[in-house]
Amino acid sequence: MHHASREKKMYADDISTNKVPISDCVMVSGFSDRPTAETLDFCFDNKKRRGTEEVRDVKMDKKQGKCWKRYADPKSAEEVYRHSHVADGHKLCVHMHNEPLRVENGQLNYHCRFLGVREEQTKIVKAQTLTDNPIVTNRDFTKGEAIDFQHAYVLINNYNGVHEEEHTSTEHAIIEAQVAMEKFQNPEPVKIQSIDQRKLEFLMKLPTEKALFENALLSNYARVKWPEINGINCTIDIISTLSEHIVDCRRLSKTWATTVRKQIESFFESLCVNELAISQEIWNDVIKHLPVDEEVAIIKDYKKLQKVFIVGHKFSANNMTRRIEDIIQKFETSHCIKKDDTKDFQKTVSVYCGAFSDQFIQYLSILEVSNFVKKQFEKEKVFGIWEFHEGNVIMMYSLSEDKAMVAVDILKTSVFNKQINISRKNYDALESHRWLEELKAIQRSNQKAIIEVFTVHEISNKTVFIYSISSEAVNLVFHKIKSFLSKSDIHNPPCKMVEMFQKMQMDLRQNEWRTPTGRFIYTRVGDITCFDVDVIVNPVNKELQLRGGLSRIIRDKGGKTIEKEFYDFIKRQRTLQEGDVLYTTAGNLPCKWIVHAVSPVWKGGDHKFKNLYKCVRRSFQTAHQQKCTSIAIPALSAGISGFPANHSTKTIVKSIRDYMNEKGHDSSIQKVYLCDINKDTVGYFESALVKYFS
């Protein structure tokens, strides 16, 4: 055979042949389901009948219909192989079993033993898989590469140029040609991030959809590692199920990650999330009557937001949404909320409650507070619903004017508040860590009274507002804060020294900085809505409403265009998290664009700093995408959001520095304005600039 392979090449490859090493093992097949390993032992381990020594090891696989028997003496295996055997009326097929083969030095070395043909008669061979896959010798082999078959056909052929007498057969003969597989390296798991949480919950809570998703992944040799149901983090891990036993496993592994990622992205794009707002008055009724259709969509309700989210495949989810809209309309009509459909009901009337402060509106918007007021309505057997209008105006609706006026009185007498004007000597106390700890202690000890403390920074003064549903709690907290401020006087230098230091600080104030990448940063005291820049940044809260603080000023000055674009975007996007941004045109303002950043509300914790850092970075990225050259940014989260001004400004400047270091050379932004109407806050900006840019 070696001589023939040199005379005639097969597919331009040389075939190297070697004799089979001595084997002490035979493979038996062709037996029925009835014989046991002991029955086969009797057939083969019988020295008197066959002259064989004892069987050293037996392995039987009835699924494959094979049995491997290893003898103490290799000659016994040879003896068994040369004779015919019958068990339970079936003629057995006995093959010599040889050790696995490897591809070495670029050549395929076959160790062959033919059935019914003596070794010296062996000629040129080529191997095919048992499933008639292409002949393996037309492939390029490298050292250690695995071959895709374990049992092979060997074909003895007549080739031109080889003497005919050298060939003894032209028939197929089966050999045992197991291949030693190099250890297969599975692809690394794929992490799919930033999945819409509601879409992920939809999959995890619907067994049918979950099974379909998992089966679809299995078709691409992948399985999903689901997160905990109580702690969904919008991330899933996809793990490969490829193995060395799968045909073309190495080729598949090269594109596995890309294929799986595209498949999952396509699946989640096929899902949609629809949002419906529900009035607080009819919330419980609507939730009780929500239709159930777990095969197509899941309804996730968020009572705090007073919204329901319908999640599912687009066609089914849209149908479900229309059904729920009908239910909402029905209950709106029955409660006289929808003023267009009142033919069969007594008409509602509206009464002007008055214009209230940002703090009052924010406090009344707290779910626990609004529920408390509604309970007061129920006690007095009065029907009343309030609505917020532009300019912090509240309108009250009821079944008659008299009842509406009663509801207004109940609303106003249900909320108590006091304010403390802060003297300049106590300004630093409100920025201290001790103040934050004091606020936490106040809220812990007055949980039932729903205490909220707001600190408002204006141009000439600072004010602390205390709100509660209990007048006693308001008075108690008022005295606690006064006591805290009086104690803080001890730690402050005399007023004259403070004023002298501040004057020196103003005289030395630097209001222009140059970054290493050649960009300029300016500090300014003033109203950001008057700045003639390309883009200004507007802080908005998680409720995504243009109601309080700077948001309200921008809305009022900029006109309806800003508000319309803002809420149109919210309807499309559905939800935003702290650190996210969106942009609109600027309406009547002198700037071109407004970036609305969802800035965090201060509650302590490193994640709040991270979210504020993201706000700034994403604001700059958005400005660059719009090819803006100048941007103005205020002290985000300071003021009614409760973020200490010194911490807010420091985080903002740090984020700007990191952005400029990474993107400054490529960014379109040339000028940055850090501004606030409070000169003390601007002073914090400048201190941070000295730290990060000097």
Image: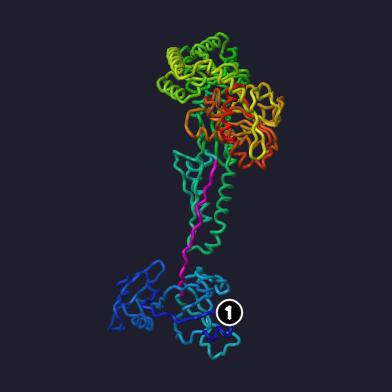
Tell me the kind of residue under disc 1. Answer: Met
User: Which of the pair 364/155 is nearer the observer?
Assistant: 364
Q: SS of the residue at dot 1?
A: loop
Q: Is residue 192 magenta?
A: yes
- Residue 162: image quadrant is bottom right
Residue 527: x %, y % from top left = 65, 22
Q: Is residue 619 above or below residue 391?
A: below
Pick out the residue farthest to the left: 48
- Residue 19: image quadrant is bottom left
The residues colored magenta run 177-195
Residue 609: x %, y % from top left = 52, 33
Residue 603: x %, y % from top left = 48, 28
- Residue 572: image quadrant is top right
Total marks in image: 1
Q: Is residue 579 visible?
A: no
User: Which of the pair 65/161 is nearer the observer?
Assistant: 161
> Looking at the image, which residue is at 59% across and 12% down?
354
Quarter holding the C terminus is top right
Q: Is residue 466 magenta?
A: no
Pick out the residue farthest to the top: 402
Q: Is residue 4 above or below residue 411?
A: below
Pick out the residue farthest to the bottom: 165
Q: Residues within 10 Å of mark 1 (few under 14, many from 20)?
A: some
Coloured how? rainbow
Q: Main secondary structure of the magenta part?
A: loop
Residue 134: x %, y % from top left = 56, 71
Q: Is residue 177 visible?
A: yes
- The residue that disc 1 covers is 10
Q: Is residue 404 above or below residue 39?
A: above
In the picture provided, is 50 more to the left or to the right than 414?
A: left
